[in-house]
Amino acid sequence: MPIVKPFMNSLRFSSTAGAGTGTGATYSILATTFTTDGGTAATAFPTAPAYYNLYINGQIQTGDTSTVTTSFITIPDGDTLSSATPIVVEFVVN
């Protein structure tokens, strides 16, 4: 019997650190402040991604750097970043 690979796709969202609110452990960026790959404003992040990757200033971050929901991403101490620092979240969905 042949092996059928599951469908996989990635969705990327971009913003800047200046779009976030809060300080320290509660610093988060709302999904609605991100732009999609298509150049439109995001309304929410995917509900059940296989996994996600966070890139801060183009550098991939370790898994313990953030948590994500459909409404926002929390980056503890993200408020210490320069406000122009690019933030990209890539969700892999199947």
Image (cartoon, rainbow, N blue to C red):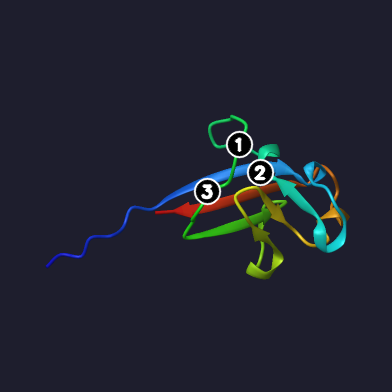
Labels 2 and 1: the sequence-earlier one: 2
Cα distance in 3D space between marks 2 and 1? 6 Å
Identify residue for label 2. Answer: 31
Q: Nearer the viewer, residue 68 or 89?
A: 68
Count neighbours of disc 1 (C-alpha within 10 A) and say few if under 14, some if 14 to 19, many if 20 or more: some
Q: Position of residue 82 (x, y in %)?
A: 86, 48
Compared to 80, does 20 lie above or below?
Answer: above
Q: Residue at x 70, y 48 (%)?
A: 87
Residue occupying the far left of the picture: 1
Left or right placement of residue 19 versus residue 73 in this view: right
Quarter of the image with the N terminus is bottom left
The quadrant in which residue 31 appears is top right
Identify residue for label 3. Answer: 46
- Helix, strand or loop at label 2? It is helix
Count neighbours of disc 3 (C-alpha within 10 A) and say few if under 14, some if 14 to 19, many if 20 or more: some
Q: Position of residue 50 (x, y in %)?
A: 47, 60
Q: Residue at x 82, y 63 (%)?
A: 25
Left or right placement of residue 77 versus residue 14 in this view: right
Is the residue under label 2 in contact with that under label 3 (CB below 8 Å)? no
Q: Position of residue 24 (x, y in %)?
A: 86, 61
Say what amino acid the circle numbered 3 marks.
Pro
- Helix, strand or loop at label 1? It is loop
Cα distance in 3D space between marks 3 and 2? 10 Å
Is the residue under label 1 in contact with that under label 2 (CB below 8 Å)? yes
Identify residue for label 1. Answer: 42
